[in-house]
Amino acid sequence: PGKLFQFKLVLLGESAVGKSRLVLLYVIVLPITIEIILDSYLFIFIYVGDLNDILVLRFVKDQFDDYRESTIGAAFLTQTINLDESTTVKFEIWDTAGQERYKSLAPMYYRNANCAVVVYDITQASSLDKAKTWVKELQRQADPNIVIALAGNKSDLSARRAIDSEARTYASDTGLLFFETSAKTASNVNELFTSIARQMPLE
Ligand code: GTP
Ligand code: MG
């Protein structure tokens, strides 16, 4: 019989860098799951076969609220990975809202987090500055043992790249895991989460 390890993971980063797309891709596509959730909202995720066809339906009580692009408050999802025959890791994932007006909610989600994915958009230089601000805040306020990964998302848009090797250098100087990902092509998405799982204390 194997062991199950459970960890809280928080996603942070500027609005529109792709946090929700990454997590939906990871949770829904690899493998297909449907998880339902929180805060008096019922979320239903339906994967229809393409990035642009992931529908997020949100219900409040019995009212149907329109699909919204930007996360409101935060969303909660879970994903389980079998690292080997005897080790299973379950992530409880908090996908936070990047819009400035939700900033004060973030401590609630990172306070008990065991790991964090700080996301920026490789085509937006300002989003890396914002990511560095999140890393500093985590280093000051979160659990001292938190495992932090920096993810440069939208790697499929390399023609519009604004951030190069500086991010990898910053991550290695700061002791962060580092991946360039794409929620569109799924590049490195599985690798990102698996590498975090392997970094966690599994004993
Ligand atoms: P907030 O919820 O406001 O914090 O934003 P977010 O970080 O969750 O961004 P979201 O996942 O909603 O993505 C924002 C936009 O970027 C959407 O239109 C996505 O389709 C697009 N997007 C996300 N990831 C990628 C990617 O890897 N490549 C490309 N080309 N577009 C992406
Ligand atoms: Mg979002």
Image (cartoon, rainbow, N blue to C red):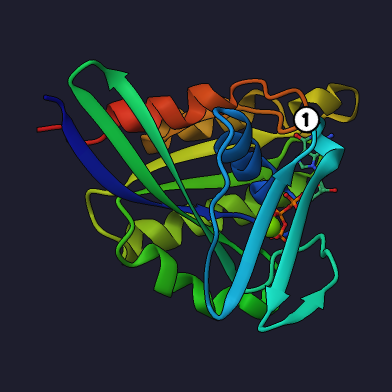
Instruction: Give the residue at x 66% y 20%.
Output: 187
* Residue at x-position 54% and y-position 52%: 35
Q: Quadrant of residue 199?
A: top left
Q: How far across and down, in percent of the image, does residue 12 sit? A: 55, 56
As displayed, is residue 137 above or below residue 196?
A: below
The disc labelled 1 sits on which kind of residue? Lys
- State the residue at coordinates (20%, 37%): 4
* Residue name at image x 46 percent, y 32 percent: 193
108 left or right of 14? left
Q: What residue did someone put label 1 on?
A: 184
Asked if one can make out residue 14 in the rendered structure from this viewpoint, the answer is no
The residue lying toward the viewer, choosing from 54 and 191, is: 54
> In which image quadrant can residue 148 be found?
top left
Q: Secondary structure at mark 1?
A: loop
In the picture provided, is 52 more to the left or to the right than 119?
Answer: right
Query: How many numbered marks are there?
Result: 1
On-image quarter of the C terminus: top left
Q: Mark 1 Cα within 10 Å, few/some/many (few <14, many 20+)?
A: some
The residue closer to the viewer here, 99 or 3, is 3
Left or right: 87 in relation to 119: left
Could you tell me residue 41's position as x and y percent?
61, 75
Which of the 4 quarters of the picture holds residue 188?
A: top right
Q: Where is residue 29 shown, x and y percent of the image?
A: 63, 31
39 to 43, vertically: above or below: below
Q: Nearer the viewer, residue 16 or 86?
A: 86
Indicate if the residue with disc 1 has its beta carbon within 8 Å of ligand 1.
yes
Quadrant for the N terminus in the image: top left
Question: In the image, residue 10 lies at what x, y percent?
Answer: 45, 54
Say if residue 48 shows up in the picture.
yes
Q: Is residue 73 left or right of residue 69?
A: left
